[in-house]
Image (cartoon, grey):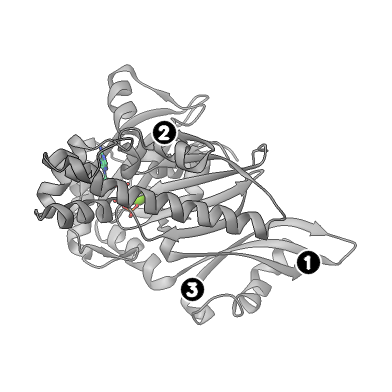
Amino acid sequence: MAKIGVGLDIGANSIKVVELQGGLKPRLNRFGKAVLPEDALNAGEIKDRELVGKVIKELFAKTKIASKRVVIAVAGQAAIIRHIKMPLMEDSEIANAIYWEAERYIPFPVDEVTLDFKVIKRYGDQNEMDVLMVCARNDIIYSHVETLRDIGLQTVAVDVQTFSLMRTAGLEGTNTEGAVALLDIGFETSDLMILKDGIPLFTRVIPLAGNRFTKTIAANLGISSEEAEEIKMNKIDALSQSDATQFGSLEAKANFAMQEGLKEMALEIRRSFDYFHLQERNEEVNRLIINGGGSLLPNLAAFLNRELGIDVINCGLPQGISVSKKFKLKIEEELPFYGVALGLAMREVIPE
Ligand SMILES: Nc1ncnc2c1ncn2[C@@H]1O[C@H](COP(=O)(O)OP(=O)(O)OP(=O)(O)O)[C@@H](O)[C@H]1O
Ligand SMILES: [Mg+2]
């Protein structure tokens, strides 16, 4: 195990970095984030490499992270995750065979993607096995790896954001009662994953997240996105009861507009749960864990609990990670931003 693990989460809205010091109880040593301009990334691919490189360099300097080895992740929308059935074979044979299988499942030529897999179950009697296949387009991965290389950083592993969050939430390889859903509410998209016993069974990218909420408020109130963002950050409560007749204050109008966006999001989640229920022989999702900047909205968990009728909680600090006193308050306040980066750093310092 490495002495230091650095997780770097390059999001559409901001870059987050976390450094964990390995040991019996890994410790959160350093962390920080830096905002990116809106067009620096597109669908998970880094478009402005120079600028993103510069922001990362400054972020490392600001957080005093000296390690040159980082773990990164591609966004949910840049990853293709499929459950496939393959003839029974050894792991060493799968690495080759899966490229042939993949042709049927992915919408790109297989030589343009990087693939990984995990055998979920082997059925000896039927001579077949369930395999989880994960892949991402090479140009997306290269856009990250090369941006980092250009500023002297080495990518030691590439994960998928939702997989990393599984680790942070303590769901990886853990038996759960019923199915559990994870929702990362970011900037342009919200990544949904449903798992059972630590195995992802369903993933979906919901095209609704923080930026859409801001835009809905801006359009409804006829104000700029900057003004709408300011109101969203300070005046919105997910359980607000504002209605059209209260159109006196800006705050009430904004809350009313936000309710529209939130109800749409709850509906999309509900639809996914229903689909999952049908696909997985009546399996119920009975817990939802939320993460991402969008989950900082006051009372969002309570709102989703009311709309979905299941337990909804905010993703907490990973078990087994300690935090020094001086960081405790700050990390608790900003934790939803760091869920992905934490899981990435954990890969390096926590044995599987
Ligand atoms: N207190 C808050 N209340 C509501 N929304 C918030 C709050 N704080 C941040 N946000 C929203 O969180 C969003 C950014 O979240 P996050 O940093 O998780 O996105 P990202 O990781 O950069 O994007 P992505 O994961 O989609 O690539 C912004 O749209 C911002 O408005
Ligand atoms: Mg994110």
The residue type indicated by label 2 comes to: Ala
Please identify the quadrant where the C terminus is shown: top right
- In three-dimensional space, the C-alpha distance between marks 2 and 1, rounded to whole angstroms, equals 47 Å
Label 3 – label 1 distance at C-alpha: 23 Å
Q: Which residue is mark 2?
A: 302
Residue 89 circle label: 1
Instruction: Identify the residue shown where x is 34% and y is 66%.
Output: 43
User: Is residue 302 something one can see in this rendering?
Assistant: yes
Graded by Cα atoms within 10 Å as few (under 14), some (14 to 19) or many (20 or more), the crowding at tag 2 reads: some
Structural crowding at the residue carrying mark 3, measured as other residues with C-alpha within 10 Å and reported as few (<14), some (14–19) or many (≥20): many
Kindly give the residue lying farthest to the bottom in the view shown.
109
Mark 2 secondary-structure assignment:
helix
- Residue that appears at 18% across and 44% down: 253
SS for tag 1? loop
Where residue 188 appears, as percent x and y from the top left, is 31, 58
Q: Look at label 3 and name its amino acid.
A: Val
When the figure is inspected, residue 325 is found, relative to residue 74, above or below; the finding is above
Q: Look at discs 2 and 1 and give the one toward the viewer.
A: 2
Name the residue that disc number 3 marks: 113
Position of residue 51 measured from the top left corner of the image (x, y, whole percent): 17, 60
Residue 224 image-quadrant placement:
bottom left
Q: Sequence order check: which comes first, mark 3 or mark 1?
A: 1
